[in-house]
Image (cartoon, grey):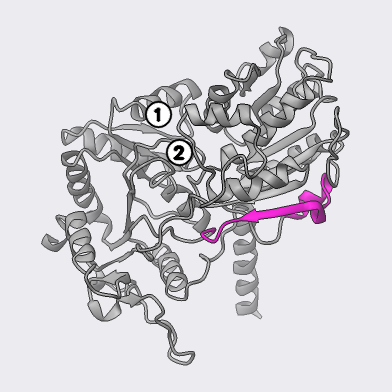
Amino acid sequence: MSKLRNIFQTSYCRYYSQKANKKLPIISCKRPEYNHYEGQSYSKFDGVKLASAGWLHEKSKGDYFTIYGDANKKEEKVVFKKSFSDIGVRQELIEVLGAQGYELPTAIQAKAIPFILEGYNTAVTAETGCGKTLAYLLPIFQHVLEWKKCVKNEFNSPFAVIITPSRELATQIGEVAQNIAQNLNLNVTTLVGGRTKQKMLNPPIEYCDVLVTTLGAYSKLVTTAIYKIHNVHHMVLDEADTLLDDSFSGKLSHLLKKYQIQFKVQHQIPPVGCQLTLVSATLPHELPDSVSAFVDPQSLKTVTTSKIHRILPHVPHKFLRLGKAQKPVELLKLVKADLNLKRPVMIFSNQTPTCDFVSMFLNENGIECININGKMAVQLKAGKFEMFKTGQVDVLSCTNIASRGLDTNRVQHIINYDFPLYTADYIHRCGRTGRLGSSAGAVTNFVAWPREVSLVQKIEASVRRDKELPHVNANIRRIIEDRIAKSADAALRSLA
């Protein structure tokens, strides 16, 4: 255990001390014979040699490896020789962006903005923290500025609607949109669930150009005709993979059938029909069948980056094989090191009781820690996250409720106290650090259970083969049902 005490100092020193060498390890292991280098290949017959191959054995406790990727290659953020003007953004928007510190478009913005401006239905998939929100907000604002000149302004009748699966994400997107819109004389409204019946009895009356909302709240107020849909010419599904999951897709399909989503919205003012944009850090290669209920899948222009569904090179990912009883002690060492280095940290657990335990354990050991989970009241969650976001507290214990969309440039370390159950969750959790505009972060994973070892082995094998991470699919309910069905089939075969 003594070799793990100063985990970050040791791993960073080992790695960066090798900068004089021409070849740096993409995967650095406790046992150097398992190190992996750029361009290294494996025999088709021998298979890939994994550092985690023996991690199901008790004696493997204390083993570790770190995935660095190619640290010489910078994250695909800035598109050189392309400005916002080059990709069609109007000067008044460029001036607002400049005042907020945005000088050049990121890779995904440079690829997506021209398609969206031209009226195409677009599926935007890119790594977390690379600027996807602005990739659709800028074209929307530019369109709305044009449409407002010729369309009668009516209350509760937005030109564009952005739908998210969670209240927290809707609130965050609303803040980003409002910061830009207030300088353009545009009205942004954020509508989330809670007191929806009160809104139905005492409906809001406001002029709204862009509406950011959750699916449940918006569908109810559209059904009751409180919000009008005839002026909606742009629909965005942010975290689209979650909204297209079985748990949302029925309600979503019923709602979107009300809109005239076109193959492509033509350049005319006012426009005819509605344009659709799907946005997420993880989307299955085959879009769910539910998409065809409201849009022609052939109409979707797919925009992505080279880093999609991969571990980003600028964030080291350390995997520690631990026993269940070792996790609290190791957590305390890591968090103390983080606080000594003034490094804000998020700690993820799979279940609410574990999340609560982590917070209580750290507080009992003199470390101020707050926790958020899906069972908390919305206002309480928002208040606690704001404390972390503004720097009042530097340690946050959370469940997957904080893994998607929530944006804070403060996070410099992610600790997966419980290793996530699915690859998509791993990508989204890790995406809370190393975001656009922040200093590079780090990820530490505690790996204790056989199921966790199995997923770690798949991730390690994918990196060694230079392939996308396996089974990136947010449709958790379908995965579980398929697993139950396979188990039942296996049981039946054993009885036959």
Which residue is most to the left?
2
**Local secondary structure at mark 1:** helix
Which comes sooner in the sequence, label 1 or label 2?
Answer: 1
Q: What is the quadrant of residue 482 in the picture?
A: bottom right
Reading the image, the residue beneath label 1 is 385
The C terminus: image quadrant: bottom right
The amino acid sitting under disc 2 is: Ala
Q: What residue is drawn where x is 34% and y is 29%?
A: 388
- Circles 1 and 2: CB atoms closer than 8 Å: yes
- Residues rendered magenta in the picture: 288-308
Asked whether residue 22 is in view, the answer is yes
In this rendering, would 238 be left or right of 393? Answer: right
The image's mark for residue 475 is none
Total residue callouts: 2
The amino acid sitting under disc 1 is: Phe
Give the percent coordinates (x, y) of residue 274: 82, 36
Q: Is residue 163 above or below residue 482?
A: above
Q: What residue is drawn where x is 60% and y is 43%?
A: 239
The N terminus: image quadrant: bottom left
Q: What residue is drawn where x is 34% and y is 48%?
A: 440
Give the Cα distance between marks 1 and 2: 9 Å
Q: Is residue 448 above or below residue 24?
A: above
The image's mark for residue 402 is 2
In this rendering, would 189 be left or right of 327? Answer: right
Asked whether residue 215 is in view, the answer is no
Q: What residue is drawn where x is 65% and y is 74%?
A: 492
In this rendering, would 436 be left or right of 485? Answer: left
Give the percent coordinates (x, y) of residue 68: 34, 63
**Magenta stretch contains residue 132:** no
**Label 1 Cα neighbours within 10 Å, binned few <14 / some 14-19 / many ≥20:** many
**Magenta stretch contains residue 296:** yes
